[in-house]
């Protein structure tokens, strides 16, 4: 059954049931258009709730640390096949948002820390990022079904770190947004023109540096001026995709949220 049906049987809001799926309490399988759960798993979960016992998560925090460490070692050594295996171990068991937030992002942060300490070369950093980009791209297809809304994801001009924008695209698509992914280094006028053309409800401007945040804020103001009614969110270094999903869930075409930043 669909997760929405399971939420009805459990007497909770869909987002509550989704939270149980994300933390591993309620087993689910990601399919086109959302999540599916079995009647047996729903019944078992409901029984344990009545008894006051919460089932343990499928992936514990220590497991995420171990998995991220395994991925880091693969990408820093340029072992793309090993990196793909690290992803495949979790695929289908966890959400794509969690794969990005809790597996890929920590591994890439470790690469960045190594580069800052002079232990990782620029070539190694670029190779690691390129491997992760290919791993993410495999999971970035647009799901079938009626979309929640239309979004445009890009980075402001001169921001060349495109991976966060790609991860934002994966996250929004997983949450049923129809996403136009424009990659990196886009003039604000181009972003605004496309947003207006596709009648976007949401524009996400991803940044990875402090100077990028300032450029994104300037670009956001221009987008709001040229595409009235669109909501604009700015993704900063350290923000999570789970936060993005929560903010995007509150976006309504007729009532855009305040400008982030």
Image (cartoon, grey):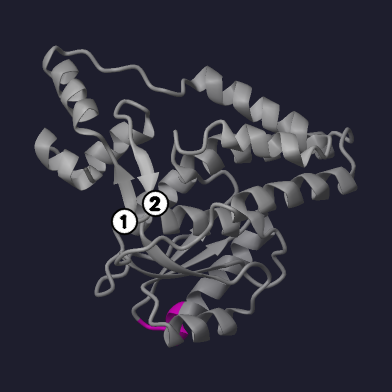
Q: Which mark is residue 223?
A: none
Q: What residue did someone put label 2 on?
A: 245
Whether residue 64 is situated above or below residue 212 in the rendered picture: above
Q: Main secondary structure of the magenta part?
A: helix
| Crowd class of label 1 (few under 14; some 14 to 19; many from 20; radius 10 Å) | some
- Residue placed at 57% from the left, 31% from the top? 89
**Residue toward you, 171 or 155:** 171
Residue 20 appears at what percent x and percent y?
Answer: 29, 32
Answer yes or no: is residue 107 visible. yes
- Residue placed at 64% from the left, 48% from the top? 135
Badge 1 element:
helix
Tell me how far mark 2 sits from mark 1, CA to CA: 6 Å
Q: Which mark is residue 249?
A: 1
Residue 128 appears at what percent x and percent y?
Answer: 77, 44
In which quarter of the view is residue 216 placed? bottom right
User: In the rendered structure, which segment of residues is drawn in magenta?
Assistant: 224-228
Left or right position of 56 against 100: left
236 within the magenta span: no
Whether residue 31 is situated above or below residue 24 in the rendered picture: below
Badge 2 element:
helix
Residue 220 appears at what percent x and percent y?
Answer: 50, 72
Residue 108 appears at what percent x and percent y?
Answer: 69, 40
**Residue toward you, 42 or 217:** 42
- Proximity of marks 2 and 1: CB atoms separated by less than 8 Å: yes
């Amino acid at each position: 059954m669909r997760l929405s049906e399971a939420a009805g049987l459990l007497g909770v809001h869909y987002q509550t049931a989704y939270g149980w799926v994300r933390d591993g309490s309620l087993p689910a399988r990601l399919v086109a258009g959302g999540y599916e759960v079995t009647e047996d798993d729903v019944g078992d979960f409901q029984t344990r709730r009545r008894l006051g016992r919460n089932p343990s998560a499928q992936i514990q925090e220590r497991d995420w640390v171990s998995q991220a460490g395994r991925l880091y070692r693969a990408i820093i050594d340029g072992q793309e096949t090993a990196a793909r295996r690290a992803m495949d171990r979790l695929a289908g068991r966890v959400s794509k948002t969690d794969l990005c937030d809790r597996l890929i992002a920590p591994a890439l942060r470790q690469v960045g820390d190594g580069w800052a300490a002079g232990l990782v070369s620029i070539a190694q950093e670029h190779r690691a990022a390129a491997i992760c980009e290919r791993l993410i791209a495999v999971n970035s297809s647009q799901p079938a079904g009626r979309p929640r809304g239309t979004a445009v994801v890009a980075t402001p001009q001169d921001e060349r770190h495109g991976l966060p924008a790609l991860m934002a695209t994966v996250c929004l698509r997983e949450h049923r947004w129809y996403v136009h992914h424009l990659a990196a280094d886009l003039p604000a006028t181009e972003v605004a023109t496309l947003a207006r053309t596709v009648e976007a409800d949401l524009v996400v401007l991803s940044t990875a540096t402090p100077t990028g945040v300032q450029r994104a804020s300037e670009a956001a103001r221009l987008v709001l001026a040229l595409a009235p009614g669109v909501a604009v969110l700015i993704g900063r270094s350290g923000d999570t995709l789970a936060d993005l999903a929560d903010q995007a869930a509150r976006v309504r075409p007729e009532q855009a949220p305040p400008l982030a930043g």
